[in-house]
Amino acid sequence: MNIEDKEKIIKEKDLKYVAQLSRVQKDMVINEGKGCILKTVNGKEYLDFTAGVSVTATGHSHPKIVEAIYKQAQKVIHAQCFGNYTYEIQAELAQLLAERSPGNLQSTFFTNSGAEAVEGAIKLSIKATRRKRIVFFSKSFHGRTYMTLSLSSKRLYREPFEPLYPWAIEVPFNDIHTTRGIMNDDVAAIIVEPIQGEGGIRPSEPGFLNELKELAHEYGALLIVDEIQTGMGRTGKWFCSEHYDVVPDIMTMGKGLASGMPLGGLIASKELMSEFSDPPLIHCSTFAGNPVCCAAGVATIKVIEEENLLDNARDRGKELIAGMNNLKDKYPTIIKDVRGLGLLTAIEMNSPKEAAAFVSKVKDLGVTLSWTMNAGANVRVSPPLIITKEQISKGLELFDTAFTSMAK
């Protein structure tokens, strides 16, 4: 069978049996990933500047991650993650996270995904405060489950499923005055992304997170900081909260936590997390904290430290942002803004049409990118934390080529 026929058969099988989430057929059949390179079944290579939406922090199929998965799978894959069973690897990962999280955050409930982590954080805040209102922000994104969709602002995705959770209150991002105006004694929590991901890679203003924590505590509520996309070294520190010197009451994790294995979590103080033990097993999950996923999580943390990937994220991020700003100066009629921190960055175009055209053109040149869901004119640029200086330079060179063709 030749490559073209194989690719066609795979696409036809996918179209027939896999749920299609878009009317546009998928055009890339990925066969292999190594480091920052993705390879299709027809042999074409792409420089990956999305990292699976900030998931493959240590790159694709890092040898130490693969080894950790293999060794744990030989021991035990699943028995019972919560209840009467204890896994050494789960306890090890929880300790490593506690030692790297800010303040008194030391008790982790593991989940299968980021959305499930947010669900758990909301349940924990409601249980602890005996309240029901949740404050969230415009252009936010926290997931697509019922509750997380209730806390995400894009109408296109909300409307088909309404009515949603009726006690969710949306306020403008970075607007402490308006947030104060809607606070009352029935607010359980304020949930915020330190840098809005799907909202266009928009950072919190200096002092905003600390003001939110003070405001929440003034009314007896909790502050949840959603670090699903910003955590695990993505911004050059373990967690983005550290840039703002704020210690959340609850912090959610996911995406880069296990280098591509399905793992998320929420972390809080031991005292706060004890709410989930009264009554016993009031919150639980069958597969959460899976030992193979936890092994990948332990290996991820070790690789990040052994290979100095926090420093690399800061250094390569500065080069990336500087290069994109140079392109902004060169193509002012196409590029509106450049934003980001570490290796979580974005190029904002003057229109969603230009963003789509740029993503398409740069893909033809051999670089994968995607736009942000709640801000269609923004193109997310978030390569693996292992990206090299040479790969950053190559990516920027191909960006320039794409913009040149758009400017004609």
Image (spheres, rainbow, N blue to C red):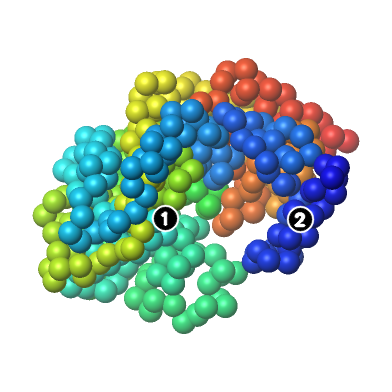
* Location of residue 238 by image quarter: top left
In the structure shown, which secondary structural element does the residue marked by tag 2 occupy?
Answer: helix
Is residue 69 shown left or right of residue 335? left
Q: Is residue 262 visible?
A: yes
> Which residue appears at 32% of the width and 52% of the height?
289
Q: Which residue is mark 2?
A: 11
What's the residue type where badge 1 is placed?
Answer: Ser
What's the residue type where badge 2 is placed?
Answer: Lys
* Image quadrant where one finds the N terminus: top right
**In the image, residue 263 above or below residue 235:** below
Crowding at dot 1, Cα within 10 Å, few <14 / some 14-19 / many 20+, comes out as: many
> Residue 206's spot in the image, x, y percent?
35, 40
**Residue 27, label in figure:** none
* Image quadrant where one finds the C terminus: top right
> Residue 139's spot in the image, x, y percent?
50, 58
Viewer-closest of 153 and 90: 90
Viewer-closest of 386 and 314: 386
User: For the residues marked 2 and 1, what is the alpha-carbon distance in whole angstroms?
Assistant: 27 Å
Is residue 92 shown left or right of residue 300? left
Q: Which residue is mark 1?
A: 113
Is residue 181 shown left or right of residue 371? left
In the structure shown, which secondary structural element does the residue marked by tag 1 occupy?
Answer: loop
> Residue 180's spot in the image, x, y percent?
29, 61
Is residue 132 shown left or right of residue 311? left
For the view shown, which residue lies furthest in the right direction?
A: 408
> Which residue appears at 67% of the width and 27% of the height?
395
**In the image, residue 192 above or below residue 229:** below
